[in-house]
Amino acid sequence: MNAAGAGSGRALIRRNSLREQISDALRDEMMAGRLPAGRNFTVKEIAEIYGVSATPAREALVDLAAQGLLVSEPHRGFTVPEFTWDDFLEIFEARALLTDNALRHLGNRAHPYDWSRTGSLRRRGDAATRAARAGHLDVLVGCDLRFWQEAAAILCNERIADYLGWLRVQSWMFAAPHLRAAGDLAGTCWDRHGDLVDRIEARDHDGARRVVNHYNLFTVELLAGLLGRSLDGLSILRLLREDQAEPDAPSARAAEQAPTEQQPVAVGLGRVPLPRFVPPGRFTRSFRPGRGEPAAGR
């Protein structure tokens, strides 16, 4: 697309699932920061951009609004919400606490994870790592999201995986515009995807938890630095920092052998299905009204 920019090119939509495809395309635009907070559009506009009838366009927009990713405004259409710094801290804290707790308990029970999936997981991780090191944000968004969706399968709990994915979509919506504003991202983004795959393949649940906690810690510290925000009072930081103080030996060796460029950016995760439960109106309490400007094409 850009959905954000009518006339800038039209995304290819598979006719067998128009509602889902339009919803996915719009979600990708928002996660990558190309459809900015405050951007307003109507059902008619989206239908014209994608060359479809009003029905699938309306259904896609309603689906995104139900997920808290759009705000429905009477007589004005739909608006992309603005996630504030406080919103992001809530999203981050929920994500970090949930993943840490889930991975701590994973080793204490039998679970039906399909270990043959690690090959696909590594391929996704390699693609995300290349995009991160090159600083290609548009590519990284998609690769990183798909990697984390695949990685979440190790939890063997679809409800947790869906909820984590919903949180990560919102993380990207907040973070991507700030990352774009930072300029050259080469060597800035989180690139330890392969390290996590190593831990999963070794059935090292504690090692995997440490890598994920490093990812989460780096995320919030990076964004706080970009925005000039304080992290004082964020209680989850103590847990994450203490966890990184005693890294497992394999992860430490991998870090020593890694390139010397600045390490990781961790924001966001894979494209995910609609969560089974989404608190109505959550994370949509503030937004900048107005139509905004069309975003540039890919």
Image (cartoon, grey):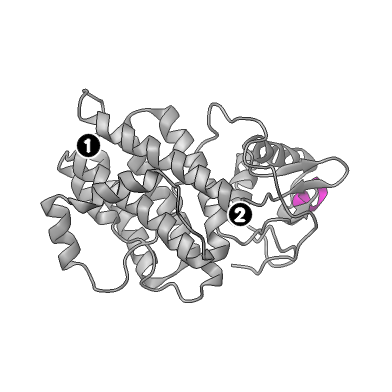
C-alpha gap between disc 2 and disc 1: 33 Å
Residue where numbered disc 2 is placed:
30
Residue where numbered disc 1 is placed:
115
Q: Assign the N terminus to one quadrant of the image.
A: bottom right
Q: Residue furthest bottom?
A: 184
Task: Kindly report which numbered mark, 2 or 1, lies closer to the viewer in this rendering.
Answer: 2
| Camera-nearest residue between 99 and 70 | 99
| Coordinates of residue 121 in the picture (x, y in percent) | 30, 47
Residues rendered magenta in the picture: 43-47
- Within 10 angstroms of label 1, few (less than 14), some, or many (20 or more) residues? few
Q: In the visual, does 293 lie left or right of 99? A: right
| Coordinates of residue 69 in the picture (x, y in percent) | 63, 44
Q: In the visual, does 270 lie left or right of 155? A: right
Q: Is residue 266 visible?
A: no
Residue at the image position 46 percent from the left and 38 percent from the top: 94
| Coordinates of residue 170 in the picture (x, y in percent) | 55, 47
Q: In the visual, does 271 lie left or right of 157? A: right
Dot 1 amino acid type: Trp
